[in-house]
Image: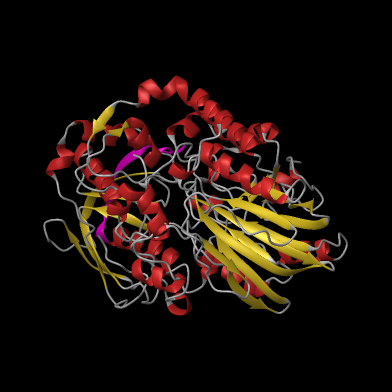
């Protein structure tokens, strides 16, 4: 799909921010939107949560991203028009399409796909060349190796090759851990950059058994930071891996490692970097999620900027957070390769004197693909293209995933599970990765794998009482809406097929879910046992991979005959700017 130049000339206006200035709209010349004004003496480029999407994609941002309590109405919990108004973005612009769900399908036809590593390579090289040698650094915030059938099959090896060619010099992790320790270490042997994670330590048993670790004296498994000299100044990059890995994923993948936010260890390490190592700036490369990073920034001193990920929030401006030592800027750079964060630092007299930050949408139609990256992508995909290019369905509606409670893609997965596994209720995890499919465009097996490809894809069918189902929903809901960000693990609400319920996000723990009913309208009985289908269980299962089950359903042609709905009613959040409609 070719982008129409007049649309982009009308709508271009990339996000820019400094510590002291509001968002600045750039000029409307499509040929120059990536020509950034030179600023400072060190540039850090940041990508995160690309989820192995090698080629350009459509990805609809959420229409529901609710903030509760102090976070209500604050970034990142703004969607639709509220987001546009907060950041001064025109509704008919390319930025509106990139950053929000506003008129998404209409805008997709105007502005095309975003991302793609060949296009990203072109932009990265351009922005690094603009500041000259030894003045720039490219970092990745994690979830680089997972999210497609190819990455899952190769256990991330394809993405290591891509990362090396792109020039990533430091990264941290999340889904990377789900390939298991051996595959992770094998990949890191081939990775030319540094893998950083200050918050991963050996368990007591693993330490007793002399398991491998970067620092055996304290049990830290990976290198916590790296110091880079940019523009004659020393900049420390500290890695913060996803702190809840053994909770959110099967423990068997990382049995010897303990995770956590580890505030105290982080503070000690930052103090050492500032004192003993005498660095001029400290940047935290985080996969905590933005709400967690905002709290962390208020409690840990000495960090200049947090380059955040995990929650897939695309926030055009850094959020300043005051703490006992000064101010820390918190950012989050979106997902799926849609965005490239550009952090320019003005360093003077051993400290950061000013900052300029821009979150640039990667408009694939405006960037020529880098030939070497395009060749590499073609080569690693070639053995599998034929097997995965089969057309299995043509959606008659927009299929997207992202949103606190539901999305048509997950509703489709739930319907497939209920139909193929003959279950009354289906549960599907609230993952935030997975691309968007436009109505009327053929869906292939490769597309389906982009929604389901994980290392624990087995489906299951089991009996659960109504009380157990409610407890499960309450537990996930508390993870999503707990007033303390440190108890939030990221992700969205588990999707429920064949079941409707009412949710009151700001209610007390255990009281957020009510009025549970089966699809026919009958109230769920606490004591009755129901047949429930699902996938991605942290406990080992023996069923067929979810992509086989959903693929069988799609090939039957029944998708176009069934209209789906979220089945969720919200209470107590009327007027919340994190809601722009449940559909």
Q: Quadrant of residue 347?
A: bottom right
Relative to 127, residue 458 above or below: above
Give the residue drawn at x 74%, y 40%: 212
Q: Nearer the viewer, residue 317 or 2?
A: 2
If the image is split into quadrants, where does the N terminus sit?
top left
Q: Is residue 489 magenta?
A: no
- Where residue 265 appears, as percent x and y from the top left, is 73, 62
**Which residues are the magenta region?**
453-466
Q: Nearer the viewer, residue 8 or 347?
A: 8
If the image is split into quadrants, where does the C terminus sit?
bottom left
- Where residue 342 appears, as percent x and y from the top left, is 61, 56
- Where residue 202 appears, as percent x and y from the top left, is 70, 49
- Where residue 322 appears, as percent x and y from the top left, is 64, 78
Relative to 454, residue 99 above or below: below
Q: Quadrant of residue 168?
A: top right
Q: Is residue 211 left or right of residue 164?
A: right
């Amino acid at each position: 799909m070719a982008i129409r130049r007049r649309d982009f000339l009308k709508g271009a206006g990339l996000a820019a921010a400094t510590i002291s200035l509001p968002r600045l709209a750039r000029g409307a010349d499509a040929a120059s939107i990536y020509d950034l004004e030179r600023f400072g003496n060190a540039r850090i480029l940041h990508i995160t949560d690309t989820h192995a999407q090698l080629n350009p994609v459509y990805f609809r941002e959420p229409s529901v991203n609710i903030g509760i309590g102090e976070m209500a109405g604050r970034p990142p919990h703004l969607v639709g028009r509220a987001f546009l108004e907060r950041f001064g973005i025109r509704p008919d612009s390319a930025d509106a399409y990139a950053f929000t769900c506003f008129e998404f399908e209409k805008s997709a036809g105007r502005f095309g796909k975003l991302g793609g590593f060949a296009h990203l390579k072109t932009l990265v090289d351009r922005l690094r060349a603009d500041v000259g040698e030894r003045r720039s650094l490219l970092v990745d915030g994690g979830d680089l190796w997972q999210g497609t059938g190819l990455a899952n099959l190769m256990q991330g090896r394809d993405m290591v090759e891509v990362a090396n060619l792109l020039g990533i010099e430091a990264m941290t992790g999340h889904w990377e851990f789900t390939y298991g320790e051996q595959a992770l270490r094998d990949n890191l042997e081939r990775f030319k950059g540094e893998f950083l994670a200050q918050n991963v330590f050996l368990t007591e048993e693993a330490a007793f058994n002399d398991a491998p670790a970067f620092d055996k004296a304290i049990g830290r498994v990976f290198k916590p930071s790296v110091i880079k000299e940019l523009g004659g100044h020393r900049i420390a990059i500290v890695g913060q891996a996803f702190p809840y890995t053994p909770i959110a994923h099967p423990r068997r993948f990382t049995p010897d490692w303990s995770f956590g936010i580890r505030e105290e260890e982080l503070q000690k390490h930052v103090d050492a970097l500032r004192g003993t190592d005498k660095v001029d700036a400290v940047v935290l490369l985080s996969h905590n999620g933005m709400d967690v990073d905002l709290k962390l920034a208020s409690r840990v001193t000495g960090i200049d900027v947090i380059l955040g990920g995990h929650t897939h929030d695309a926030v055009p401006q850094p959020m300043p957070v005051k703490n006992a030592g000064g101010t820390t800027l918190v950012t989050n750079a979106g997902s799926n390769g849609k965005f490239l964060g550009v952090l320019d630092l003005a360093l003077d007299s051993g400290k950061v004197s000013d900052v300029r930050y821009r979150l640039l949408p990667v408009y694939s139609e405006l960037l020529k693909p880098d030939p070497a990256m395009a060749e590499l992508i073609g080569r690693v995909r070639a053995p599998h293209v034929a097997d995965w290019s089969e057309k299995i369905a043509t959606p008659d509606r927009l299929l997207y995933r992202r949103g606190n409670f539901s999305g048509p893609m997950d509703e489709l997965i739930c319907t497939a599970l209920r139909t193929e596994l003959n279950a009354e209720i289906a549960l599907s995890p609230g993952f935030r990765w997975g691309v968007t499919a436009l109505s009327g465009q053929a869906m292939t097996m490769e597309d389906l794998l982009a929604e389901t490809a994980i290392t624990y894809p087995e489906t299951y069918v089991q009996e659960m009482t109504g009380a157990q189902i409610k407890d499960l929903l309450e537990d996930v809901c508390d993870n999503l809406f707990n007033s303390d960000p440190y108890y939030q693990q990221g992700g969205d609400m588990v999707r429920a097929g064949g079941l409707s319920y009412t949710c009151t996000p700001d209610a007390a723990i255990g009281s957020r879910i009510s009025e549970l009913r089966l699809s026919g309208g009958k109230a769920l009985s606490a004591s009755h046992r129901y047949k429930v289908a699902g996938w991605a269980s942290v406990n080992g299962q023996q069923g067929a991979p979810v992509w086989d089950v959903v693929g069988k359903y799609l090939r039957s042609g029944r998708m176009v005959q069934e209209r789906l709905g979220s089945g969720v009613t919200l209470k107590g959040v009327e007027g919340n700017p994190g809601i722009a409609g449940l559909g």
